[in-house]
Image: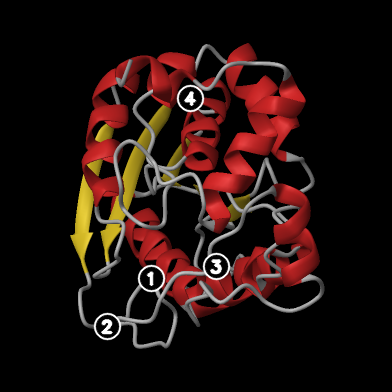
Amino acid sequence: MKAVVLLSGGQDSVTALYWAKEQFNDVYAISFDYGQRHAAELKAAQKIAHIANVKHEVIDIKHCLKSTSPLVSDNDLETYDSYDQMDEVIGDRQELTFVPMRNSLFLTVAANRCDYLDFDNIVIGVCEMDNANYDDCRSKFIESAEEYINYSLGRDQRNGKHWIMVHAPLLKKSKAETINMARSLNAMEAMSYSHTCYAGQTPPCGECHSCVLRAQGFKDAGIDDPIFSRYS
């Protein structure tokens, strides 16, 4: 009953971390420095891990992921005036912030840590409902990732080791449902230190995809975003 948790420092990963603390006896959180524009999330992850009292590692993979995504390039972020406008602009296309193979790489390293630490679970805070159309945040990807991880490690009961399970507890939840889940898990103090803004700004810019999505989620949940209490 031990789990490696992917902790980006954003709101979903906070909720996934606290969910893991409820489910498992031992939790080890990992974050990635991949040269992201919003590197402020790494400081947030360190603070959140401290509040949650879990072991935490920041893994340096800068220069590994190449993309035209504005998260790892000089390209401009798309900004939006409202949730409805964002939903109309993005539609069925993939949001431009998508970084190819990012979650695949993160899960591969998480599996490495599981094998090294003798853990049997990975927790990731991906969500299909984020209006971004990321293919690596879908059920089929999570199921396929679990298979490739275990076949890569020979964990098909031939070597006496348990199958590593990949858990995505937020996969089918809206942002409002995730926020209510975080509140039920007593994660709101940690949530107040989370960093979601893709522009890397503190206070958040309020216009990028992640900021607009977060604001709408708290609005739908009928809860004030605790992050703003630190800037008042």
Of circles 2 and 4, which is in front? 2
Q: Secondary structure at mark 4?
A: helix
Circle nearer the N terminus (2, 4): 4
Of circles 1 and 4, which is in front? 1
Q: Is residue 48 above or below residue 67?
A: above
Q: Secondary structure at mark 3?
A: loop
**Location of mark 4 (residue):** 21
Residues at circles 1 and 4 in contact by the CB criterion of under 8 Å: no
Which amino acid type corresponds to the residue marked 3 in the rendered image? Arg
- The CA distance from mark 1 to mark 4 is 29 Å
**Residue 138 drawn at (x, y percent):** 73, 65
Of circles 3 and 4, which is in front? 4
Residue 123 appears in the rendering:
no
Residues at circles 1 and 2 in contact by the CB criterion of under 8 Å: no
- The CA distance from mark 3 to mark 4 is 25 Å
**Location of mark 3 (residue):** 155
Q: Is residue 68 above or below residue 137?
A: below
Q: Which mark is residue 71?
A: 1
Q: Nearer the viewer, residue 39 or 140?
A: 39
Q: Nearer the viewer, residue 26 or 72?
A: 72
Residue 88 appears in the rendering:
yes
